[in-house]
Amino acid sequence: MADKTYKIAVLPGDGTGPEVVAEGMKVLNAAAKKFGFQLESDTFDWGGERYLATGSVLPEDAAETLKKYDAVFLGAIGHPKVKPGVLEKGILLKLRFDLDQYINLRPVKLYPGVETPLANKGPEDIDYVVVRENVGDVYCGIGGTSQQGTKQEVAVQEMVYSYFQVERCIRFAFEEARRRHSKDNPWRGLSPEDIAAGKIAQVTLCGKTNVLTYVFGLWERVFHEVAADYPDVKTAYCHVDATCMWMIKNPEWFDVLVTSNMFGDIITDLAAMTQGGMGTAAGGNINPEGVSMFEPIGGSAPKYTGLGVINPLAAIGAGAMMLDFLGEKEAAAAIERSIAYVTGNKLKSVAAGKMGYSTSEVGDLVVENL
Ligand code: IPM
Ligand code: MN
């Protein structure tokens, strides 16, 4: 039988994006060779440089183009010479919307050997996943302003959620909880010993039902409705402010944390710091029925551009998530194990410029230990 072939659209983007994407592709290609599948990739130059040169943020048919691929691999969007919001809204958010990538999946995982600012917490304590709704909420762009620029200015930006959006997001979270702990998950699955010790899958809803009673009233009702279909999964609820507290104090309480777009944006930066910073934080913009886009969540880090000091592990981890999502579970798990080996045995630090290796050497180390 011929090897399976996956078509990947590569969007290196701005700043250090191209450097980390190159390492990601290096590792993905090595994994393809080892695990018997093929990757065919096309690269698109969408980002700040193209915008400055042409005045176009994205080609009109960008989403249609990407729909011809099995997945999208993104470096970073954000350019110091472009006003904040133009590229973020014009590229990243636009693609999330147009491809209906309604889930932002962010694993929070402290790799071995990585320093966390949380006292007395280790890799066994910091290992959960945030399921962030990715297209609704204040991100939907409904709102307006009047008398702008005067002292009478009024601005409104609405938190909007439909039953449909909330239901599909929460259902994804419960499916993720089952998937995370299933026997076919070679990396994160619970062992028989774990299960004997009483560990089971849990989904925690993070909301604000004490103030945002309309929106999170809806989330809470749908949460219980969906939970009824998953009697094997435990449920919990935390207000978003308390969630921040527990993420620092008792991160081991979390397994799958499901939340709205804005809260998810905020808590996942906090979560990334608990896993040692942006160096290893990966994410996926997922449309389970369509084309998904995987990215390191750290941004374009312009000050490190071209120096070969940026940590590529977040991009490599995003590549592993992409393979997992494409169904190449063994290859994905092997990459994750290799990342863990490299952080545990090789790197001095996961921070840019402090790794003890260059960007491309870190990519090589992950390949060598696959
Ligand atoms: C993220 C980013 C984006 C967001 C920005 C760049 C629009 O912060 O992916 O978390 O707010 O979603
Ligand atoms: Mn963010």
Image: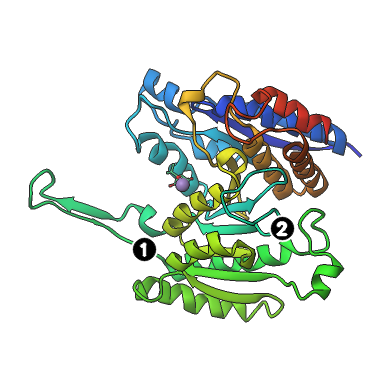
In terms of depth relative to the viewer, which is nearer, 349 or 213?
A: 349
Q: Which residue is mark 2?
A: 124
The single residue placed furthest to the right in the displayed view is 1
Q: Residues within 10 Å of mark 1 (few under 14, many from 20)?
A: some
- Where disc 1 sits, the SS reads loop
**Ligand 1 quadrant?**
top left
Q: Position of residue 266 (x, y in %)?
A: 44, 53
Could you tell me the amino acid type at mark 2?
Glu
Residue appearing at x 55%, y 29% in the figure: 17
Q: Residues within 10 Å of mark 2 (few under 14, many from 20)?
A: few
Quadrant where the C terminus lies? Answer: top right
- For residue 361, the mark is none
- For residue 160, the mark is 1
Residue 228 drawn above or below residue 323 = below
Q: From where the camera sits, is residue 172 visible?
A: no
Horizontally, is 335 left or right of 314 in the view? right
Could you tell me the amino acid type at mark 1?
Val
- Where disc 2 sits, the SS reads loop
Q: From where the camera sits, is residue 182 visible?
A: yes
Residue appearing at x 80%, y 74% in the figure: 197
Structural distance between the alpha carbons of marks 1 and 2: 37 Å
The single residue placed furthest to the left in the displayed view is 151
Q: Quadrant of residue 199?
A: bottom right
Q: Position of residue 160 (x, y in %)?
A: 36, 63
